[in-house]
Image: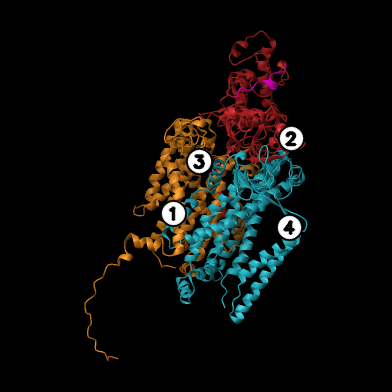
Chain colours: A cyan, B orange, C red
């Protein structure tokens, strides 16, 4: 690509000042010198400032006791844990909300995107309004909206809304029974893994058979039976080791059970709704990018509307959709840093707290940047693999 | 083949008949667009239920039950909360927005000096509108005035300190004034910087190319909040003792550099779409690098990526709301700040304020995106690809 | 072409770059003609903008006092609102000359963050506030096990909270926000049962809630929170000026010098008053410090003595109505004590 602009010139006969090659080298040398000088100047300033102000530096602080608590943590954490672990908790929280958001945003986005191309006028209009509203307001506002909305609508803990299966909804979040796995529950996990492996195997065999003989095999139903049936069987065999911890009312809040806090809920809903609007547009563009002849050819072969969409249009549309979809996933991950505005303990919020408790501004910001950069590169890498799989295979 | 004697050949055209009644009018439209099939009918019903659930409530809240005027919280609170509204009342508190409107627009900009931002706004509109309308002549002069002269005039007017204008520090700025000035400068800076970065990334000079790639990919990989943190907590340590940046300027640099990296990628997309023949044609005419880029490649590439550029602008406009995390108060920040005013603390205040802020942001973003669609259609004169 | 871009940015930057403090803060301050004072983003009684946008409160007045000592004019101050996160870097980098922002004095901040606290302008302690209407029967912090607690992140408050619940073997559920307004809003909306911060702050915050009468501050004080102004390390002269401005405020109260009577006091027969107000012949107290000899007169004229400052901003003359308590002078059983000015 870069070679497009290379000039294939005769070796210059005039002064060497006019030789683009030499000029290029000279120009780059200037850039390098300026840059090195700038970096050196900054480094000097930082060192001078830090020593003048006697600010400690280095990453040693990561091993000291954090001393503050975090409301939501996927791993064991208390105020006795280290700053390093606190940052890890924040990182995991970022990953959790990003993954949950990506899944939901993709689902909503696909539904809305296909809805915008629906023959049904009403559905089309509703989807258009959705997209135009969410695309044009800042994500931070969407988050505030959900948060103040969630807090305003829900009742205080003593007047919790009772939901089926002993679940409760109140201002402190959504509570539902937590599964407690007893002895022998590892069997269920093994059975589940076995079920997935067998389903995969069956699917492969079925495809081979269809290629060879043209006979179809009900892969979907067999897989479902394997994936659900085997664990259920294992559950029964191991003597029903599962029990539930139900949320109970106590002085202040509900205790026990599993609690989804309103901060997480608002952030997750806001990120999903916001990103879904963009994904919908991408999906719409992708589907419209599939040549109409493809649909018509499929119809001529006798396929019905459902299979046409599933077997012909979507696989082709995916090729157009995936690259921009990747950047939306990245955006969602980055936007999860807005959590700081509503107090969800994500990486930015916790790194900010650590930075403030220790005063190590440079190290704190470096950690933040490095982690987000790594996350972005990882997401890009995964999506590149998916893209390569999806890309048009020409025979 | 002509064994049969054709007894009748019609020589004149048959008159067009109107469509059968089943294909005409409202009934047919409904049949085609709403209840074409069973699935469609179910979808329509779901849609109607959805709209019926949401729309009346929204209209009632925003218009019918809304309170438009008032001096304090009593107009927007129910009797139980110490106000005048009946129990169970729920409506927008536009009175709050009304009372705080000045703050939402200008922040804590001194009241006596508010004619200055208003004057700047008038100048801005007066220069922008003719630029946007394709028929108005003298685009070049207009653009120079808007992007060259206006910033200088606006800077003098808004900051002051010379020509007898009292100095207004940027820490007093707020509201829409901050949102718009941040985005205007961001747009004006990010486009040229983005072009330079995009050219750098496609340059044949390896070091320049590498530096541009590192910059673009790093900035695109991290959230704007981190960039703003960087600007607000780290930048001061990068400078020698005794030199410090204005906070507003720091936010400005952060937002502009952030947008520039995205802009660079959009423009690179345009550059890649220009056929190689254009480059070669320019070379064969003996044009130098800058002539080639400035006269041949860039105009075509920019035209191609107008939607992308405008999307970046919209994104940046929305992103300015993040300056709230470094305690600057843009429109959203000021609105949020006013929620803590005890004089207006009601259950409806936050919702009304946020809806107002959302509406203002929406108006600007929607306007921009519609204008970009219009331009795209107008410029789409060339060969369709 | 990168350097051109940098050049353009640099040129634009120069337009607003302001030279602030280097090693000799006093010279810089005198050269620019005002003191840049870092305050909070809005805490009633300490530093909060009023309707006209003027900063009011003890912390804001303290900066005015320093300005009066340096320039003889208490209005030569500019305020920079800072979040908890920004405050230390702002001082370290020279963006502000004094950090007067209800900041707790700790050893870590003196040693590892490069600050120098000049004294304690307000002795505070961390307390708890609850909504008594929603939680009848709770009258001690020891009954708070299981509660959701709203707290501002990155403060000593957050650390004390963790220590307190841990040492009393109680559980709690932290709800942490970046900014004070956000904590207020969440508490008011019922997101948490308890609000914890410095007790003075609780009284101020209570006023801004929807129905202040419903909320009570629990009696326990769980920590020492000595709040005071801080300056950068490595500039002893500036440190002394700010420190002695604080002592002068106390000394003035001790000697009964007020905003109203300071002019008459100048001619007082009391040698101590004369000395403090710089009325002794050939006195060098002020000039040795680096300010004019009538510096205490200027301070008191600008903001009054410490007692006046206290009553006006947080005490009986304010909506907060906080009692002097341990913030009374040592002569009245409090902790405020100034070394002699002689």
Q: Which residue is mark 2?
A: C164
- Please name whichever residue, C241 or B329, is drawn nearer the observer in this view of the structure: B329
Q: CA distance from mark 3 to mark 4?
A: 49 Å
- Please name whichever residue, C286 or C153, is drawn nearer the observer in this view of the structure: C153
Residue beneath the point at 69% across and 68% down: A197
Same chain for the residues under marks 3 and 4 in the image:
no
Q: CA distance from mark 2 to mark 4?
A: 42 Å
SS at mark 2? helix
Q: Which residue is mark 1?
A: B48
SS at mark 4? loop
Please say if the residues under marks 2 and 4 sit with CB atoms less than 8 Å apart: no
- Please name whichever residue, B315 or A154, is drawn nearer the observer in this view of the structure: A154
**Magenta stretch secondary structure, dominant:** loop
SS at mark 3? helix
Same chain for the residues under marks 3 and 2 in the image:
no
Q: Which residue is mark 4?
A: A240
Q: Residues within 10 Å of mark 4 (few under 14, many from 20)?
A: some
Q: Nearer the viewer, mark 2 or mark 4?
A: 4
Q: Quadrant of the N terminus of chain C?
A: bottom right
Q: Nearer the viewer, mark 3 or mark 4?
A: 4
Q: Nearer the viewer, mark 1 or mark 2?
A: 1
C46 shown above or below A345: above
A296 shown above or below B182: below
């Amino acid at each position: 690509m870069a070679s497009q602009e290379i000039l294939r010139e005769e070796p210059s006969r005039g002064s060497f000042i006019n030789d683009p090659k030499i000029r290029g080298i000279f120009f780059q040398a200037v850039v390098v010198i300026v840059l090195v000088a700038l970096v050196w100047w900054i480094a000097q300033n930082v060192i001078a400032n830090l020593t003048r102000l006697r600010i400690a530096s280095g990453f040693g602080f990561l091993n000291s006791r954090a001393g503050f608590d975090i409301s939501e943590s996927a791993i064991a954490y208390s105020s006795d844990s280290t700053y390093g672990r606190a940052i890890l908790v924040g990182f995991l929280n970022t990953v959790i909300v990003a993954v949950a958001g990506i899944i939901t945003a993709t689902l909503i986005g696909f539904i809305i995107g296909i809805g915008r191309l629906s023959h049904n006028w009403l559905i089309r209009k509703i989807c258009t309004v959705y997209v135009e509203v969410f695309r044009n307001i800042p994500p931070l506002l969407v988050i505030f909206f959900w948060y103040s909305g969630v807090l305003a609508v829900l009742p205080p803990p003593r007047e919790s809304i009772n939901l089926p299966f002993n679940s409760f909804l109140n201002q402190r979040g959504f509570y539902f029974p937590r599964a407690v796995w007893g002895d022998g529950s590892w069997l269920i996990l093994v059975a589940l893994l076995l079920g997935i492996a067998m389903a995969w195997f069956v699917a492969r065999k079925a495809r081979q058979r269809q290629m060879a003989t043209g006979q179809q095999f009900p892969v979907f139903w067999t897989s479902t039976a394997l994936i659900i049936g085997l664990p259920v069987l294992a559950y029964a065999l191991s003597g029903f080791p599962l029990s539930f911890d139900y949320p109970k009312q106590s002085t202040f809040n509900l205790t026990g059970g599993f609690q989804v806090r309103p901060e997480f809920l608002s952030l997750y809903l806001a990120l999903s709704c916001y990103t879904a609007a963009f994904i919908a547009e991408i999906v719409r563009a992708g589907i419209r990018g599939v040549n109409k002849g493809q649909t018509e050819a499929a119809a001529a072969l006798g396929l019905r509307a459902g299979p046409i969409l599933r077997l012909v249009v979507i696989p082709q549309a995916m090729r157009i959709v995936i690259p921009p979809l990747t950047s939306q996933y990245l955006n969602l991950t980055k936007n999860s840093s807005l959590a700081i505005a509503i107090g969800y303990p994500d990486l930015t919020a916790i790194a900010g707290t650590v930075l403030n408790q220790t005063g190590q501004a440079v190290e704190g910001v470096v950690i933040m940047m490095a982690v987000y950069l790594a996350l972005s590169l990882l997401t890009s890498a995964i999506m590149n693999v998916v893209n390569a799989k999806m890309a048009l295979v020409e025979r | 083949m002509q064994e049969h004697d054709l007894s009748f050949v019609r020589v004149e055209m048959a008159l067009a008949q109107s469509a059968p009644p089943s294909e005409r009018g409202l009934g047919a439209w409904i049949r085609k667009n709403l209840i074409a099939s069973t699935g469609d009918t179910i979808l329509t019903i779901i849609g109607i239920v959805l709209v019926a659930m949401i729309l009346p409530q929204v209209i009632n809240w925003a218009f019918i039950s809304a309170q438009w005027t008032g001096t304090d919280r009593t107009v927007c609170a129910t009797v139980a909360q110490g106000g005048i509204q009946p129990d169970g009342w729920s409506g927008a508190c536009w009175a709050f927005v009304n009372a705080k409107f000045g703050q939402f627009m200008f922040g804590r900009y001194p009241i006596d000096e508010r004619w200055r931002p208003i004057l700047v706004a008038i100048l801005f509109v007066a220069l922008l509108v003719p630029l946007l309308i394709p028929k108005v002549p003298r685009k070049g002069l207009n653009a120079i005035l808007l992007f060259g002269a206006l910033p200088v005039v606006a800077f003098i007017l808004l900051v002051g300190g010379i020509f007898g204008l009292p100095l207004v520090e940027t820490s007093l700025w707020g509201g829409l004034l901050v949102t718009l000035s941040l985005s205007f400068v961001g747009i004006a800076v990010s486009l040229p910087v983005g072009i330079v970065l995009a050219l750098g990334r496609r340059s044949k000079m390896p070091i320049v190319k590498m530096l541009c790639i590192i910059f673009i990919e790093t900035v695109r990989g991290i959230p704007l909040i981190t960039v703003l943190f960087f600007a607000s907590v780290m930048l001061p340590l990068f400078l020698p003792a005794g030199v410090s940046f204005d906070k507003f300027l720091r936010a400005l640099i952060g937002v502009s550099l952030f947008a520039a990296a995205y802009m660079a990628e959009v423009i690179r997309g345009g550059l890649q779409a220009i056929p190689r023949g254009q480059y070669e044609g320019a070379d064969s005419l003996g044009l130098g690098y800058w002539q080639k880029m400035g006269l041949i490649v860039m105009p075509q590439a920019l035209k191609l990526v107008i939607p992308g550029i405008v999307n970046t602008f919209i994104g940046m406009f929305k992103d300015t709301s993040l300056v709230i995390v470094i305690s600057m108060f843009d429109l959203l920040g000021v609105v949020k700040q006013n929620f803590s005013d005890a004089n207006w603390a009601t259950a409806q205040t936050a919702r009304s304020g946020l809806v107002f802020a959302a509406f203002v942001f929406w108006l600007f973003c929607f306007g921009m995106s519609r204008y970009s669609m219009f331009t795209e259609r107008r410029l789409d004169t060339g060969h369709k690809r | 072409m990168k350097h051109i871009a940098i050049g353009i940015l640099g040129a634009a930057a120069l337009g607003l770059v302001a030279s602030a403090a280097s090693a000799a803060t006093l010279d810089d301050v005198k050269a620019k003609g005002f003191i840049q004072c870092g305050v909070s983003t809005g805490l009633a009684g300490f530093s909060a903008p009023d309707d006209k946008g003027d900063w009011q409160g003890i912390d804001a007045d303290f900066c005015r006092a320093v300005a009066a000592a340096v320039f003889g004019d208490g209005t030569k101050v500019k305020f920079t609102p800072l979040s908890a996160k920004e405050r230390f870097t702002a001082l370290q980098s020279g963006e502000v000359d004094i950090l007067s922002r209800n900041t707790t004095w700790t050893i870590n901040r003196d040693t590892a963050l490069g600050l120098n606290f000049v004294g304690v302008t307000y002795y505070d302690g961390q307390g708890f506030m609850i909504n008594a209407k929603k939680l009848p029967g709770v009258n001690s912090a020891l009954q708070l096990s299981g509660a959701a607690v709203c707290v501002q992140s990155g403060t000593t408050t957050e650390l004390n909270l963790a220590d307190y619940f841990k040492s009393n073997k109680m559980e709690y559920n932290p709800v942490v926000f970046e900014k004070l307004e956000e904590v207020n809003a969440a508490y008011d909306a019922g997101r948490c049962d308890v609000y914890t911060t410095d007790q003075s702050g609780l009284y101020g915050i209570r006023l801004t809630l929807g129905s202040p009468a419903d909320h009570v501050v629990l009696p326990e004080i769980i920590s020492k929170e000595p709040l005071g102004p801080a300056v950068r390390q490595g500039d002893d002269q500036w440190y002394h000026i700010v420190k002695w401005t604080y002592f002068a405020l106390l000394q003035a109260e001790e000697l009964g010098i007020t905003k109203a009577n300071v002019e008459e006091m100048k001619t007082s027969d009391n040698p101590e008053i004369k000395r403090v107000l710089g009325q002794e012949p050939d006195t060098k107290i002020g000039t040795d410090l680096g300010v004019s000899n009538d510096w205490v007169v200027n301070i008191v004229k600008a903001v009054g003595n410490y007692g006046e400052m206290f009553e006006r901003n947080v005490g009986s003359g304010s909506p907060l109505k906080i009692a002097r308590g341990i913030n009374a002078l040592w002569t009245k059983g409090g902790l405020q004590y100034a070394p002699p000015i002689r």
